[in-house]
Image (spheres, helix red, strand yellow):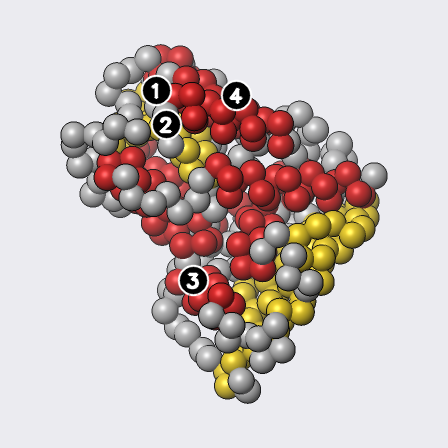
Amino acid sequence: MRKMNKDYLNFGIVGCGTVASIHAEALKSLNNARFISVTDSNLSKAREFAQKQGVWAHDSFEDMLNDPEIDAVCICTPSGFHAENAIRALNAGKHVVLEKPMALNTQDCERIKEACAKNRKLLTVISQLRFSNDVVTVKEAIDSGKLGKIVMCSAYMKYWRSPEYYSDVSWRGTFAFDGGILMNQGVHGVDMLLYLAGNAKVINSKGKRLFHDIEFDDTVISMLEFESGALGVIEASTCAYPGLERRIEIIGTTGSAVLIENMIDKLIIDNNTVITKENLFKCGSANNPASIDYVCHARQIDNFIRAVLYGEKLFIDTEDGAKAVALIEKIYAAAL
């Protein structure tokens, strides 16, 4: 891929929903990014968002993609549009920052990979928790063997979403555009579990629709076996009032780690409890999807920009994004 002859990228954002504001703040915080435009299928919504952010609004996604000033796009549309939006942007010669999940199935993930290769463009899937200080600390403890042999690895995502959360927005809770509790709300927890503990296979799963009037099950439990031999579970729900913070547990024979959202709750190594206060921000949304801080997004986008401009290593690529989708797909299949 040819390196660019400037020290910044011009960005457009497509989709002006909740997460677009997080991307906007992340872009504005970076010296190597220029946030210049937005677009949305609802043009009045795009214009309102553009005015608030001090940028301009393209009349359509096609208009944005045809703009030679745009180097990269942040795709913040509903999950069911991610694959088509990403492929269109890549085919138009744009680099892509793609919100989670990468797509709703592995076939579409493969199509995105092929578009990246064909057009020689980079794409990163938002997995911002990997850039959190405490997550990095736990990852280093695991990889260095400080926790000993890992025996259990689990993720608990017991969130609350009101009935109105689904009924007020037509795409939420649908097979075509939402992807369900694990694809929509839970994919970051799944990604972080795989990042920390390694690849896993599904032993068994159970899903039920316990509260919401939606197409997907709103509660899922799955038992996993990791390549290391460790066992674990994923528990996810949008019925857990008032919404509990995500909890990741990595249990070893000489130490254990517990992350609450992106912060260390416990890190025990050889009977010594390690406490860190480095992380002063939180990337969580137990009962409010808009409550996520932009700092981790900014760190990931900065890495993406450096990869585009200078050929530095892209920390989260299409292979990483596809892993979480593949596991979730298998969990759903086992829950039928």
Residue annotated with mark 1: 93
In terms of depth relative to the viewer, which is nearer, 259 or 199?
199
Residue 101, placed above or below residue 267:
above
Q: Is residue 201 visible?
A: yes
Inter-mark Cα distance, 4 to 1 = 14 Å
Residue 328 place in picture, x, y as percent = 67, 42
Q: Which mark is residue 84?
A: 4
Kind of residue at disc 2 = Lys
Q: Is residue 244 left or right of residue 145?
A: right
| Earlier residue among tags 1 and 3 | 1
The quadrant in which residue 131 appears is: bottom left
Q: Residue at x 21, y 30 (%)?
A: 4
Kind of residue at disc 4 = Glu
Residue annotated with mark 2: 121
The mark lying in front, picked from 4 and 1, is: 1
Residue 292 place in picture, x, y as percent = 46, 50
In terms of depth relative to the viewer, which is nearer, 28 or 99?
99
Q: Is residue 138 visible?
A: no
- Residues at marks 2 and 1 touching, judged by CB atoms closer than 8 Å: yes
| Earlier residue among tags 2 and 4 | 4
Inter-mark Cα distance, 2 to 4 = 16 Å
Residue annotated with mark 3: 136
Callout 4: few (<14), some (14-19), or many (20+) C-alpha neighbours within 10 Å? some
Inter-mark Cα distance, 1 to 3 = 33 Å
| Earlier residue among tags 3 and 2 | 2
